[in-house]
Image (spheres, helix red, strand yellow):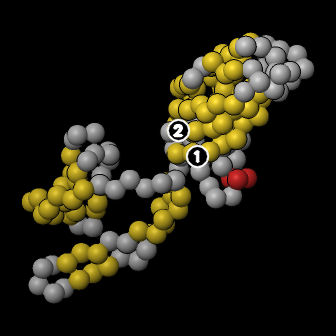
Amino acid sequence: EGGINVLVIEQNIGVATTIAAETAIMVNGRINRIIGSATLAVGVYAITLTVSDGKGGVSTTAPQSVEILPRDLTITSASPARILQFGQQTITVTGTGFVNDPDPAKQTKLRIDCSSFCQGGSLVTVTINSIEEDTIIATIRTTQKTPLGNRDAVVSNPNGATAKLLRSNFVAP
C-alpha cells in the first residue's frame, strides 16, 4: 500500500502485479494517466477495457470474467474474551476470509466450542449479526447450565475451510 502500480501497454501486453492505491497507465514508454484502484468483494465480475484516442476513436474489449477469491480463513481475535454465564452479549471476531452472502447456507458460520474443555456440550447459542471479509459481529447467549471455562472460536466456510482460535473466550459466573 502507498506504492504505485505501473500498467505497461505495448504491443497488446498489459501487466499489473501488485495492489496499490494508484495505477499509472504507461503507453509506448510514456505515462498516459494515473487512476485510482478499486476494491472488489469476493465474487465473479465481467470486466471490459475501453480505450479512447482522445480524438473520437474508441475501442472496447469483450467482457472478461474475473473471479475474486476470499483470503485464507483465519481468526486473530474474539473479544470480549469473557462470556457471562446465563447471559447475552455481543462479541467481535476478527480475521480474514469471512464470507457474507444473502443465502445463510453460503456464508461463514461461527461457533463457540468447548469440545476440548467441557463435557455435556458447549450450551452456547451464536447468532451472527453481521459479516464483513475481516469481521464478524455476533450475539452469544448462555444458560444457567452452560459449563464454565475456556472456549474456542471456530469459523467455517461453505467450501469446507475452517479456522480455530484456541481458548479465545471463557464462560464465567
Q: Helix or strand or loop: what does disc 2 sit on?
A: strand
First-in-chain label (2 vs 1): 1
Q: Pointer 1: what residue?
A: 130
Residue 107: in sight, yes or no? Answer: yes
Can residue 162 be seen from the camera position used here? no
Question: Residue at coordinates 9% horizontally, 60% vertically from top-left?
Answer: 30
Residue at position x 56%, y 25% in the image = 79
The residue lying at 24 percent from left, 75 percent from top is 51
Q: Nearer the viewer, residue 23 or 84?
A: 84
Assess whether mark 1 and mark 2 are in contact (beta carbons under 8 angstroms).
yes
Q: Secondary structure at mark 1?
A: strand
Q: Which residue is mark 2?
A: 135
Amino acid at pointer 1: Ser
The quadrant the C terminus occupies is top right
At label 2, which amino acid type do we have? Thr
Total labels: the figure holds 2
Task: Compare residues 101 and 29 and report the one nearer the observer.
Answer: 101
Label 2 and label 1: CA atoms lie apart by 8 Å
Dividing the picture into quarters, in which one does residue 7 lie? bottom left
Is 23 situated left or right of 135 in this image? left
- Left or right relative to 23: residue 62: right
Q: Which mark is residue 63?
A: none
> Is residue 136 positioned above or below 33 on the image?
above
Q: Where 130 falls versus 44 (above or below)? A: above
* Left or right position of 62 against 108: left
- Image coordinates of residue 70 in percent, x first then y, are 53, 46
Q: Residue at x 71, y 17 (%)?
A: 171
